[in-house]
Structures are given as structure tokens and as C-alpha cells.
Amino acid sequence: MGAEEAEAHRAAMRIDGKRDAVFESWKALNQSFDLKEWRGSSEAVRKLPMMVLWSGSWTDRWIDEGKMVVAALPDAKFVYHSGGRWPQEDAYDELSKLIAEFVTSLPPMRSQYIDQSSEEATAQE
């Protein structure tokens, strides 16, 4: 979604009775992203080690969403965390530890590939 489209959505939300329609359109955009397709989109993406951190303390529906992510990304490490919707605020210590453990568990070759991919992405900017 570009800046103009985002601004149009923001303006529409200010109109009485339009907020629900805007939320539904955002929901449709979010659910249109196919993780499995993205994961297989290129060799570089397929090679990336991946960990998904998911809240295990929300509703059953949210946990079911997490199970769909697991199904779409079977080679990713999947870890539930105790935080809520904004875990960077309420579970930051736990998240930091999980991320550090994941990154340091990668074989050196994978770590070098991540560094190389990061450098290439920075050079393209």
C-alpha cells in the first residue's frame, strides 16, 4: 500500500460509519499475503534461517493463526512467547533472549550468509 492509498484509508476512517469498512479492507490485505509463496519466491529467501515468535497468551483464534503460520513455514523455528500484541513492550527480555539464542545457534556459514545478505540489501538502498 502506497502513501496516497494509506492517506485515503486514514481519511475514510474519519467518516462516520466507514471505520469498519476500512478495517475489513486492511484485514483482506493482511490475509492476502501468502507466506508459503513468499518463502519459495527466491533462492535467497529459501536459504534464510527463520524463527517465528508468536504470542501463546491470546485467544484460541490467535493461536490457530499461529498454527497456520507453522504450516506455511515448516522449516522455520516456531516459538510461543508470553507477551501480548506488543511483545516488544511487555516481553522484551524474553524476546531478546529467544532471538539471541536463535542467532547464536546458527552454524557459522549461515551467520555469514545473513551478514552478506544484510550488506547486499544495504548497498541496494
Image: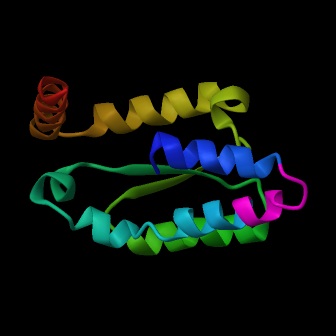
Q: Nearer the viewer, residue 106 or 49?
A: 49
Residue at the image point whose x is 13% and y is 33% from the top:
108
- Say which of 72 and 14 sits in front: 14
In percent of width and height, residue 97 lies at 51, 29
Q: Is residue 38 left or right of residue 25?
A: left
Identify the image quadrant of residue 76: bottom left
Regarding residue 73, the answer to whether it shows in the image is: no
Give the left or right position of residue 24, taking residue 70 as reference: right
Q: Who's the residue at 89% across and 61% down the image?
A: 17
4 vs 84, left or right, is: left
Residue at x-position 18% and y-position 32%: 121
Q: In the rendering, at what x and y percent does residue 91 appear? A: 68, 32
Can you say whether 101 is above or below 28 in the image? above
Instruction: Give yes or no for residue 62 being in the magenta stretch.
Output: no
Evaluate whether residue 93 shows in this view: yes
Q: Quadrant of the C terminus?
A: top left
Is 71 or 43 nearer to us in this picture?
Answer: 43
Is 99 situated left or right of 17 in this image? left
Judging from the image, the colouring scheme is rainbow
Which residue occupies the foreground of this view, 116 or 21?
21
**Can you give x and y, in whole percent of width and height, for residue 73 in the image?**
37, 66
Which residue, as the protein is rendered here, is positioned at the far right? Answer: 16
Instruction: Give the extent of the magenta segment.
Output: 15-22
Q: How many marks?
A: 0
| Residue at figure coordinates x 82%, y 46% from the top left | 14
Which of the 4 image quarters holds residue 10? top right
